[in-house]
Amino acid sequence: MGDRTHHRRERLRIIEEWSRTGVLAERRSLPVEQQFRDRVSRTGSRLFVPLGLAYSDDPWYNTQVSHLLEAYDALPHRPDLAFDSVWKVFESTAVRTVATRTGRRRNITESLRYVSDHVALDGAVFEAMTAEVPSQTCEYLFKKVVLEAATEKGRRVGQRLTGGAQDATAAELRTFLDLAHAPGADLDANRRRAMLLRRALAGERLRIGAEEVLLSARARSRLLLGGLLYTARNERYHGESFSPFYSSTASLKTYTHPHYLFLATYALVHLLWAQWEHPYSPHTEAVAENVTENLREARTLYGRHWLA
């Protein structure tokens, strides 16, 4: 409680100092921010390496490039803000992709479902992304799709994943999430189940009780796009989640979750662009190499904290 009180006072103290000097004055670093700077310096990780892009006069494309630059500017210290910016590009790209393929514009929820179910994402890139989900991200996803399933927000997440009575993928996810749920489970048990979710996302064949489960690529894609990324985006957009690095519980592993959200969304943007027949479309092979490189840089930086 004392540590939490200290952080609450420290956040207000920062604002108080700026109320006298203006925000151009550099504020004191919070302990977790200094730890992160020290780790970046010590490990020699490049953190993130963007894929080079081709020139085009296309106005839509240049708008998206501006948001990508905004995302990169937020790095290395604010991967959560980088995620916010790259999500803008992904949302616009997903809606545009679906409108082109189907002949009608759909909202982002419908577009995410269509992309998950009908757009073939490169297997190597998708497998790399789902094999490297950090522990904190899995705990977050488990909380949203299992522990909070009975709440209003949880029902909305569940509807994105399992809505549609005639949907085979929805039935597959319902079965898996029911198996993963354990009423009254303690904290350690919930962490173990979150790691079970991690293995399911990675495409492992699992035995849960008497049942054997192997999630299809379509089900895993829904979990990633509609379950994880869109839920995180909504909570941040509507101010429902705490700004991560000002929390009294923030640690080095706190950085892993927004970093992964950013990397996965960034990869999906380029995967979708690679399928377009535009002069600026990147080659899928280049996207795959870049995703692998950035996951390797992240693991180098965070080390054991990635799976802590």
Image: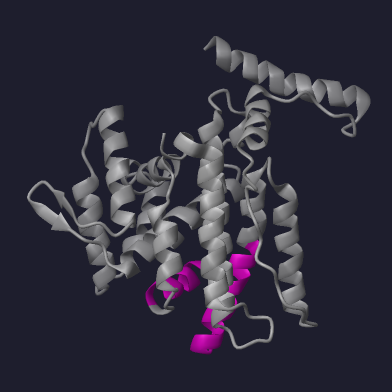
- Location of residue 30 in the rendering, given as x and y in whole percent from the top left corner: 69, 24
Could you say where residue 55 lies in the image, as x and y percent from the top left? 77, 79
Identified at 24% across, 74% down, the residue is 166
Task: Identify the image's colour scheme: rainbow, by chain, secondary structure or one colour.
Answer: one colour
Residue at screen point 33% across, 49% down: 198
**Which SS does the magenta portion mostly show?**
helix
Image-quadrant location for residue 61: bottom right
Span of residues in magenta: 88-117
Query: In front: 240, or 49?
Result: 49
What is the residue that sits farthest to the right in this orientation?
A: 21
Which residue is located at x 65 percent, y 48 percent? 46
Task: Name the residue at the top extreme.
Answer: 2
Residue 200: image location, x then y, percent: 28, 54
Q: Is residue 21 magenta?
A: no
Question: Is residue 126 left or right of 22 when viewed as pictured?
Answer: left
- Is any part of residue 106 visible from this angle? no
Above/below status of 138 relative to 277: above
Please state if 166 lies on the left or on the right of 62 as rendered.
left
> Does 128 sit above or below residue 260?
below
Q: Nearer the viewer, residue 118 or 277?
A: 277
Q: Is residue 111 magenta?
A: yes
Residue 14 coordinates in the image, percent (x, y): 77, 23
